[in-house]
Amino acid sequence: MRKAGLITGGALTAAGKAIHEGMSTLELDKIIHDYIVSHGAKPSFLGYAGFPASACISVNDTVIHGIPSSHEKLKKGDIVSVDVGAYIDGYHGDSARTFAVGEISDEARALMDSTEGSLMAAIAMAAPGVRIGDISSAIQEYNESRGYSVVRQYVGHGVGRELHEDPEVPNFGRAGHGPRLVAGMVIAIEPMINQGTAQVKVLSDGWTVKTVDRKLSAHFEHTIAITRDGAQILTLPE
Ligand code: MG
Ligand code: MG
């Protein structure tokens, strides 16, 4: 799973380096696809439930599951959430980051910082004996105390031979509840955090998830392994 995780993290870093004003989200998808394939892996998302691309690319008010398109061009000031999975030797990695296109507003930066900060805080507390609800409530509290809202309909998950496995890892919940983490588990923690309302809607393409108030949304995700000494992030770049 380290191998799958490194390729996933590397693909995201390659995406981040390539992002520039005027590029289409389909061009960005191709860079990610080529990185994964050139490292001997398969893009986990390509063909998953019929998804037509290698990465989910979600701009501004798109929360997740944005479909890369030659018509959608990145503009200065956009924030773009890129979600990637790589499959190799029978296992998946799954990771997401929100990137800035050029200079962005202070409000957009603060939303990204809160989302990523809550992910890193959750990872820092993940260890054997900790309950899923402890992680869920920590992410919720971190973001709501900064004035943001937590998307309810989509959650983190176990990762392994399948891209999405049990247990569910919600970004909201009650401390002291839910299954306990044990050494050897691998989970993806992935806060999806909105600037305005938590409400989202799925567009008629069946994939694209947007905020109903058109305000910004950010998404950060790592696949982590629970060890006796705490969590190790598998989806960092090499
Ligand atoms: Mg993902
Ligand atoms: Mg995931």
Image (tube, grey):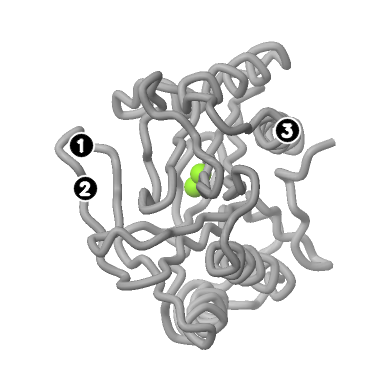
Locate the C terminus by quadrant. top right
> Label 1: which residue?
206
Tell whether circle 1 marks a residue whose Cβ is less than 8 angstroms from ligand 1: no
Circle 1 or circle 3, nearest the eye: 3
Instruction: Check disc 2: other Cα within 10 Å, few if <14, some if 14-19, many if 20+.
Output: some
Q: Residue at x 75, y 31 (%)?
A: 3
Residue 114, image quadrant: bottom right
Instruction: Check disc 1: other Cα within 10 Å, few if <14, some if 14-19, many if 20+.
Output: few
Residue most extreme to the left: 204
Element marked by disc 1: loop
Residue 125 in picture, x, y percent from top left: 70, 75
Q: Who comes first in sequence, dot 1 or dot 3? A: 3
Left or right: 60, with 145 as reference point: left
Label 2 with label 1: CB-CB less than 8 Å: yes
In three-dimensional space, the C-alpha distance between marks 2 and 3, rounded to whole angstroms, equals 29 Å
Q: What's the residue type where badge 3 is placed?
A: Lys
Q: What's the residue type where badge 1 is placed?
A: Gly
Location of residue 115 with respect to 23 vertically, above or below: below
Left or right: 25, with 32 as reference point: left
> Label 2: which residue?
202
Element marked by disc 3: helix
Q: Who comes first in sequence, dot 2 or dot 3? A: 3
Residue 49 in picture, x, y percent from top left: 30, 29
Kindly tell me whether residue 187 is visible in this rendering.
Answer: no
Q: What's the residue type where badge 2 is placed?
A: Val
Q: Residue at x 76, y 38 (%)?
A: 2
Instruction: Check disc 3: other Cα within 10 Å, few if <14, some if 14-19, many if 20+.
Output: few
> Label 3: which residue?
17
Kindly tell me whether residue 209 is visible in this rendering.
Answer: yes
